[in-house]
Image (cartoon, coloured by chain):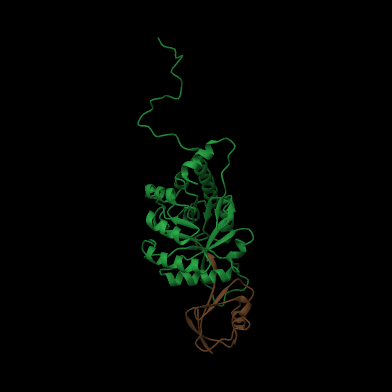
Chain colours: A brown, B green
Amino acid sequence: MQLYLNGEPRTVEATTVAELVATLNLGGRRVAVERNERIVPRSKHADTVLEEHDRIEIVHAIGGG
Amino acid sequence: MSIDDRHSAAQRPGVEDLPLTIAGRAYRSRLLVGTGKYRDFDETARAIAASQAEIVTFAVRRANIGQDPDAPNLLDVISPERYTLLPNTAGCYNARDAVRTCQLARELLDGHSLVKLEVLGDERTLYPNVVETLKAARELIDDGFGVMVYTSDDPIVAAELESMGVCAVMPLGSLIGSGHGLLNPYNLSLIVEAARVPVLVDAGIGTPSDASLAMELGCQGVLMNSAIAHARHPVMMANAMRKAVEAGREAFLAGRMPRKTYAAEPSSPVEGRIQG
């Protein structure tokens, strides 16, 4: 399935947000996920099924002022 | 409490300063710091520790896909248990992006909803876009966020933001990252005099005397990043900034002497001088 992940097209085998986060080596890290401009709460990652052409944003904290 | 009331309270012996209160939480430190531009996380952690800041701001960005799972994370360095974390919307140029960024930050921090809103106007100056800032502030407040808002030093805009319900107004001293200090202390005084929420100078501080001046004007705090991170010795500068903010605050509460054109009264008594 093709997604837009952080603005870039990407083909993935994951079927849920939780699987996607895990396959990207981001499992257990402090990240926040948006699917089609709506927040996906951490508690819903496992239940949120991905669909073709979903726009996924995965963000984290970095240094800034 | 008006500035005059605070002055007279400080004049009474034994009256101590009240803590800085933001969104219902009290802080001893009036210095807020950023986490950008340091050499590495170790320097970030040491500088923040030296500043004794309790509120620390950070940015929200796309995660590096395929990154090393063991790479250190900023939130390991500035733990949410030790600091009040203040996600910011730096780099947002419209209200929509700023609101999305705050919603992602709230998810990132498990529901913590205090944010630093900044919506920039152009990439050359990073001057705030107050039109988009006002729009974003309204949406965020309606969505339950505590909003500390970066804005211009326009007193009318500051009053408008306060009336919307922001929990702190944060005018610039000068442009972000410029180190020019306080270019319009008179405007900052107008904002401080009228405000009922904390006013903190955010942006433009270059050196400790700038931070002291902001506090002497009656600002409730100062937020800075580059002035510490871009110093030759950031940890030492963080310590200097802590002292400058404390000194400025005490000077404000103590109430400075009146300015005079010339010293009509010498400090030493006139009586008893030997005279030939």
The x and y percentages for residue A57 are 52, 77
State whether residue A28 is above or below residue B30: below
State whether residue B120 is above or below residue A47: above
In-front residue for pair B181/A42: A42
Residue drawn at (57%, 75%) of the image: B67
The x and y percentages for residue B42 are 59, 59
In-front residue for pair B68/B106: B106
Residue drawn at (42%, 24%) of the image: B266
Residue drawn at (42%, 67%) of the image: B135
Q: Is residue B77 visible?
A: yes
State whether residue B205 is above or below residue B12: below
Residue drawn at (59%, 37%) of the image: B14
In-front residue for pair B235/B170: B170
Classify residue B42 as left or right of residue A9.
Answer: right
The x and y percentages for residue B60 are 51, 68
- Which image quarter is the C terminus of chain B in? top left
The x and y percentages for residue B61 are 51, 70
Q: Is residue B91 visible?
A: no
